[in-house]
Image (cartoon, rainbow, N blue to C red):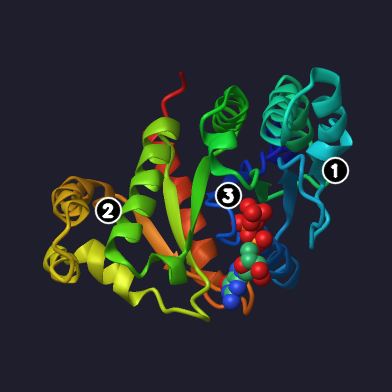
Amino acid sequence: NQASTSEPSLSPKPIAVLVIGMAGSGKTTLIQQINSYMHAKRKIGYIINLDPAVTHMPYEANIDIRDTVKYKNVMKEYNLGPNGGILTSCNMFATRFDQVIKLCEKPRDPALQYIIADTPGQIEIFTWSASGAIITELLASSFPTLVVYVVDTPRCTNPQTFMSNMLQACSILYKTKLPMLLAFNKVDVTRHDFAIEWMTDFESYQAALDKDPSYASTLSRSLSLVLDEFYNGLKSVGVSAVTGEGMAEFFEGIEACAEYYEKIYVPE
Ligand code: GTP
């Protein structure tokens, strides 16, 4: 009897998504929207909160750093300021992140499809710390993993601000070596067409810069040539974390990045 001798079919691994972006770009609101979308579409996901200092969370996290470390106690105990307290709390949590991986590898619901991680408000606390590197590496060596870089679209309409945000994204890509989905958020306030145009048409970006003859503008001109390669390999999508616009495309982007991960990921 074929059925009794064959191995049970393994369900595919869940996709891990690290949500990173500048403070105020809308990470938390976007995760709330992702959560509602998953419920509506019967997709099964875990949400991990990695921000020890968050006071209000509009969604319920399955795994919450605040259940393990109290950052105010860490501040007191080690005589640290707020940033040092957050950083140390993240480092403490990272030492136990293997337990989080185990929970996600043997989830209560074996049909788990997504693991969505919300990162601390201050971007560099995650991107330039031991904890960020450890957590990223543990996720990426266990699951198909990608970075969603959230862009505050209304705050990027100036070509130089846009450039500085893209350099930040590029640096994260360089450090994590993971597929990246650019989520142009807040499209209910400002459409992201200008950004797509600047990323795909070098001359239109140059034309926007021509209005500003400063040194920074000359630098941006040269950098945009460098970033051309970065833009080529990048997926992007316009979303509104408030209205839910673009969520279907967002999930398509996640799936495409996960497929790309299979092709490019090389364990350290
Ligand atoms: P930190 O916790 O500082 O990292 O912020 P965050 O990146 O998690 O951003 P958060 O979700 O707290 O959103 C910041 C502000 O932007 C809030 O006032 C949100 O209501 C607003 N916001 C987020 N997404 C959208 C959006 O798609 N459209 C509009 N109009 N506002 C948004």
Q: Is residue 6 left or right of residue 53?
A: left
The kind of residue on which mark 2 rests is: Tyr
Mark 1 / mark 3, whichever is N-terminal: 3
At label 3, the amino acid type is: Val
Other-residue count near label 3 (Cα within 10 Å), few / some / many at <14 / 14–19 / ≥20: many
Q: Amino acid at mark 1?
A: Arg
Residue 19: x percent and y percent?
Answer: 58, 49
Location of residue 76 (image quadrant)? top right
Nearer to us: label 1 or label 3:
3
Q: Quadrant of the N terminus?
A: top right
Classify residue 265 by image quadrant: top left
Q: CA distance from mark 1 to mark 3?
A: 23 Å
Is residue 37 among the parts visible in the rendering? Answer: yes
Counting the numbered discs, the total is 3
Residue 188 rendering spot, x and y as whole percentages: 52, 81
Residue 75, x across and y down, in percent: 80, 28
Front residue (pair 258, 233)? 233
Left or right placement of residue 25 versus residue 61 in this view: left
Secondary element at tag 2: helix
Q: Nearer the viewer, mark 2 or mark 1?
A: 2
Which residue is the site of mark 3?
Answer: 19
Residue 231, label in figure: 2
Q: Label 1: few (<14), some or many (≥20) within 10 Å?
A: few
Q: Pointer 1: what residue?
A: 108
User: How far apart in space, not on screen, are marks 2 and 1 (Cα)?
Assistant: 39 Å
Give the residue at x 79% y 57%: 57
